[in-house]
Image (cartoon, helix red, strand yellow):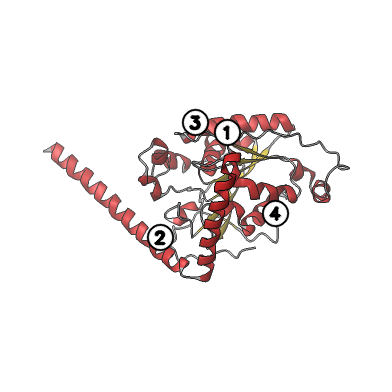
Amino acid sequence: MALVRAGLGRLATVAAAAQTTAIEIGRAGAYAARTFGAPAGVRGLAVEWAWLAAHLVVYPAGLLREQLADSGGYRTDSLPPVRRSLLVTDLEAAGTPILLVHGIMDNRSVFTVFRRSLRRRGFGAVHAVNYSLFTGDIRTAAHQLGSHVEQLRERTGAEKVHIVGHSLGGMIARYYVQRMGGAAVVDTLVTLGSPHGGTLTAHLLPTPLARQLRPGSDLIEELRRPAPRCATRFLVVWSRMDQMVIPQRNGRLIHPDLDVEELELRDVGHLSMPIDPRAVHWVATALARSDHRPHPLIRGQRQRPAPDDTLGHPASPAS
């Protein structure tokens, strides 16, 4: 009899989870229909497909490991004007290396536009890393990321680094910062389209990595634990048109112990977040200020714990 009751209990749990999943997918589908029916949504979809085509062209080159180049020290005579300007304006910000971490089944080529934009704005040490396409565990990948961070610090002589992670890359970096002591050496962590609350699309793959990215997984719950000594600043970019993070609001990061600023977009697809001009401008402007005070042009908002919203939450104005 006890076995029967246990079996019925499991069936009820599965049924409730399936019902919740169906409701969330229905909400996301309804919102997507409204979005793609608007001019901004159509434009965003076109950009997503265009960038996908361009990304497929540069993808093979991104498989090669990038060599870390010397930053050139603090001499300014050989630097372009914009780089020299950032050094004069904020030496600490200009001297902080930036490490770029790609998403699942991708490589460093996804940051082709993003990295060029950062360098044009004066950042000299911008380095992209590749991790294995067969990565099956976020914790293991976070440990490997820590090794990359230490190599970058040793090569540049910097005390701290910034990390920019797209999709899964943001989750790997967050685990490193929040659970492996990375906050001591990571000044700012930027996440672009990362499923901080998990994503229902992870149910489509029966792999260990996908299970870690499902809502309510052990890893997601671990990241919700208290992190009172985490001093890293988080810059979170998420979109209500993200087709990979379902429901889209799970791209937000709400944690009582973390210093979070976010930029909400409505018309940008998952893959094209690293090339969106608003996202690039917002991130670059924030990283150019070592004092961590929001720049007047930055229209993101500092997050505090709040009730879970629905798809009717108003968007932050884009810069």
Residue pointed to by mark 4: 285
- Up-down relation of residue 146 to residue 196 (above or below): above
Q: Nearer the viewer, mark 2 or mark 4?
A: 2
Q: Secondary structure at mark 2?
A: helix
The quarter of the displayed image where residue 60 is located? top right
**In this picture, is 32 found above or below 217?**
below
Q: Nearer the viewer, residue 198 or 231?
A: 198
Query: Which of disc 1 and disc 3 is earlier in sequence?
Result: 3
Q: Quadrant of the N terminus?
A: top left
* Residue where numbered disc 3 is placed: 140
Real-space Cα distance between discs 4 and 1?
Answer: 25 Å
Residue 141: x and y, percent? 51, 33
Count the marks: 4
Residue sitting at x 47%, y 48%: 195
At x 38%, y 37%, the residue is 207
N-term-proximal mark, 2 vs 1? 2
Residue under numbered circle 2: 28
**Mark nearer the N terminus (2 vs 3):** 2
